[in-house]
Image (cartoon, helix red, strand yellow):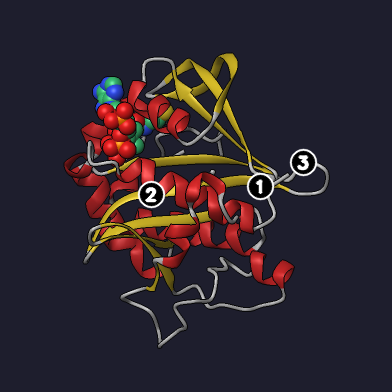
Amino acid sequence: METAVHPPPHGVDDLLGVSGLEAQQIVHSRSHGAQSATVPTALCGIAAAQAAYTVPMTHGHRIQGSVILRELLPEDAEPLAAAYIRNRSHLAPWEPARDDFYFTAAGQAEDVEAKIADCEAGRSLPLILEDGELIIGRFNITDIVRGPFLSGHLGYWVDQAYTGRGIATAATRQVLSMAANDGLHRLQASVLVNNQASQTVLRTAGFQKIGLAEKYLKIAGQWQDHLLFQRLLDRD
Ligand SMILES: CC(C)(COP(=O)(O)OP(=O)(O)OC[C@H]1O[C@@H](n2cnc3c(N)ncnc32)[C@H](O)[C@@H]1OP(=O)(O)O)[C@@H](O)C(=O)NCCC(=O)NCCS
C-alpha cells in the first residue's frame, strides 16, 4: 500500500496488449553495467528461479516519455524521502498514518531494506517510477503467496505533479505483464470507496470488483471500508 491501491497491512504475452511494452524494456539508467535490453526482467531472483535465467535487478521498462518503471534499489532511500515529502498531503488521505521518521532518508532506508529482503524471500515485487533522478511513484506487489493460490496484492501511487497523464494506467499494464511472467495467477487490489481515479485505473486494466470489505484497512488513522478488486492473469 504505499499506495493507491492498498495491499493489506504490514504489496504474457498479450495480456492487455503489453507485449508492446515488453519490447520497450530498457536498461536502467543507474544500472551497474551494460545488460541486454531483450532479457525479461527478473526481480529478486523470483522469476529467475522459475524461468531458469538470472538477470541482475538493473532493468526498467519505459512507461511514458522519460518515465521508467524499475526495481527498488538500496540507493533509492534519499530520493524516496524527497518524494514522500513532496507528496505528503497528496498521499495522506489514501495511506496509513505515517510518523515523521517515515519522511526521512533514514526512515526510508529502513523501509527499503525491509522491502528488498521481502522481495528476495519471494514475497513481493517492489517497483519504482522514476523520471531522471526524480522518483515519481511506486508500484508494489506484496503478500505474494504461491502454492495453489499464486496471488499477490497490488498497490501504487503517482506523484501529484505527474497525475492525469495515464502513467498509472500504463504502469499497471506493465506490472500485470511482470506478474504473469512471474507465474502468478491473480492480483488483488483494495481501494477506498471514494477513490475514483484508482478505481478507473483498475477497471481499465481489467480488474473486476469482488465486493465491499467493511473496515478493511486503517487508512489516515481510521478503519475504512474498501472495494476489493481482482485481476486473473492466466493465459488460458
Ligand atoms: C490513483 C493514481 C495512482 C492515479 O494515477 P494517474 O497516473 O493520475 O492515473 P491515470 O492518469 O492513468 O488516470 C486514471 C484515470 O482516473 C481518472 N481520474 C483522475 N483523477 C480523477 C478523479 N479525481 N476523479 C475521477 N477520476 C479521476 C483519469 O481521468 C483517468 O481516467 P481515463 O483513463 O478514463 O481518462 C494517483 O491519482 C495517485 O497516486 N493518487 C494518490 C494515491 C492514491 O490514490 N492512493 C490510493 C489509495 S486506495
Label 2 sits on residue: 138
Q: Could you give the CA–CA distance between mark 3 and mark 2, rounded to whole angstroms?
A: 25 Å
Q: Could you give the CA–CA distance between mark 2 and mark 1, rounded to whole angstroms?
A: 17 Å
Q: Nearer the viewer, residue 134 or 117?
A: 134
Residue 53 placement: quadrant: bottom right
Using the image, tell me which numbered label, if any, was put on residue 149. Answer: 3
Residue 116 point in image, percent of width and height: 53, 62
Which of disc 2 and disc 3 is earlier in sequence?
2
Give amino acid for label 2: Arg
Give amino acid for label 3: Phe
Residue 83 point in image, percent of width and height: 24, 50
> Which residue shows up at 36% across the image and 28% down it?
94
Label 1 sits on residue: 144
Q: Is residue 159 above or below residue 132?
A: above
Q: Nearer the viewer, residue 53 or 2?
A: 53
Q: Nearer the viewer, residue 54 or 94?
A: 54
Give amino acid for label 1: Ile
Residue 169 point in image, percent of width and height: 37, 41
Which of disc 1 and disc 3 is earlier in sequence?
1
The answer to whether the residue labelled 3 contacts the one labelled 2, judged by CB atoms less than 8 Å apart, is no
The answer to whether the residue labelled 2 contacts the one labelled 1, judged by CB atoms less than 8 Å apart, is no
Q: How many marks?
A: 3
Camera sees residue 95: no
Say what secondary structure mark 3 lies in.
loop
> Which residue shows up at 22% across the image and 53% down it?
82
> Which residue shows up at 46% across the image and 25% down it?
191
Say what secondary structure mark 1 lies in.
strand
Camera sees residue 173: yes
Which of disc 1 and disc 2 is earlier in sequence?
2
Q: Nearer the viewer, residue 151 or 217?
A: 151
Q: Is residue 65 above or below residue 31?
A: above
